[in-house]
Amino acid sequence: MRSWGLTDQGCVRKQNQDAYKIEQLDRTSVLGVVCDGMGGAKSGNIASTLAVEVFSQEVKQSWKPYLSQEKIDQILRSAVKLANFTVYDQAQQFEEFDGMGTTLVAVLVHGKKATVVNVGDSRVYGIDDSGIRQITKDHSLVQMMVERGDIKPEQAKSYPGKNLITRAIGTEAVVMCDIFHLDVAKGDFFLLCSDGLSNMMDDQEILFEVVHGVNKAHCCKRLLNIAKNRGAPDNVTSVLIQI
């Protein structure tokens, strides 16, 4: 199993409020996390960094090989809960952090299984022999409108208010996360990214770069370069895991 990550402030933002982390938990288990902070120049980066560190540390400390799926889900939910409490507590204590929050998306690959957890609109894509699919579902206003039939999926990417999310780490005392379970095989990929990347590229473009790029270690850089060539108005972060 191999993994790579990269984050960049993009072409417009003066500060990078994204954060990511990759943790090798044991010989056959790896954790990847991406967070996209919000709340202004003084606090968005604090929220994302806190969430990444607290979440990954909690998973790492609780991890043991050969855990049941039920126990893995419990560990991930507890890590989300602790990350949410930490960011929320800081926002309540310090006026300069008022209103800060962050998305959080993570993949825990363990043997021939993978568990995905998601809060917000950062994404995980699964890539295998059949192509690419978005594993996570955006917790966003436009996604709700798509599900209601108010707008078409192809309109969502450019719809006004695209960046308004309905769930975030740290904005409320309690947050709900989604969990997804997948089987994995040798050669499969997971791509985690902030919306700074997914807003700049469509799924088939991402698929092409991951599958057909000669050097997988340079894939995150190639994705970043495409986003920046298109203006990259937001921070851009990606983590690629190859089974």
Image (cartoon, grey):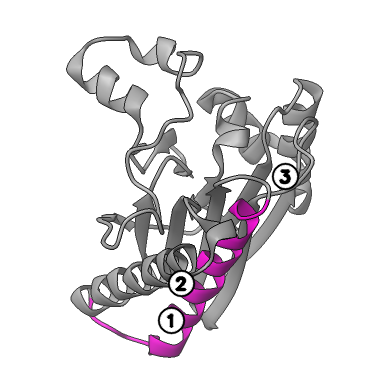
CA–CA distance in space, label 1 to label 3 = 29 Å
- Per the image, label 2 sits on a secondary structure element best described as helix
Q: Decide if residue 169 is on the left or right side of residue 30.
A: left
Residue 74 visible (yes or no): yes
Q: Height in image: 109 above or below 105?
A: below
Q: Secondary structure at mark 1?
A: helix
Q: Which residue is mark 3?
A: 219
Residue 58 has which mark? 1
- Measuring from the top left, give residue 197's x and y in whole percent: 62, 34
User: Looking at the image, which residue is at 29% across and 62% down?
Assistant: 173
Q: Residue at x 32, y 38 (%)?
A: 166
Mark count: 3
Q: Quadrant of the N terminus?
A: bottom right
Does the residue at mark 3 contact the one at mark 2 (Cβ under 8 Å)? no
Q: Earlier in the sequence, mark 1 or mark 3?
A: 1
* Gap in angstroms between the C-alphas marked 3 and 2: 26 Å
Most prominent secondary structure in the magenta stretch? helix
On whether residue 179 falls in the magenta region, the answer is: no
Q: Which residue is mark 2?
A: 55
Q: Are marks 1 and 3 in contact (CB under 8 Å)?
A: no
- Amino acid identity at mark 2: Phe
Report the magenta residues as a range. Answer: 42-68
Counting other residues with Cα less than 10 Å from the Cα at mark 1, is it few (<14), some (14-19), or many (20 or more)? Answer: some
Which residue shows up at 52% across the image and 50% down it? 189
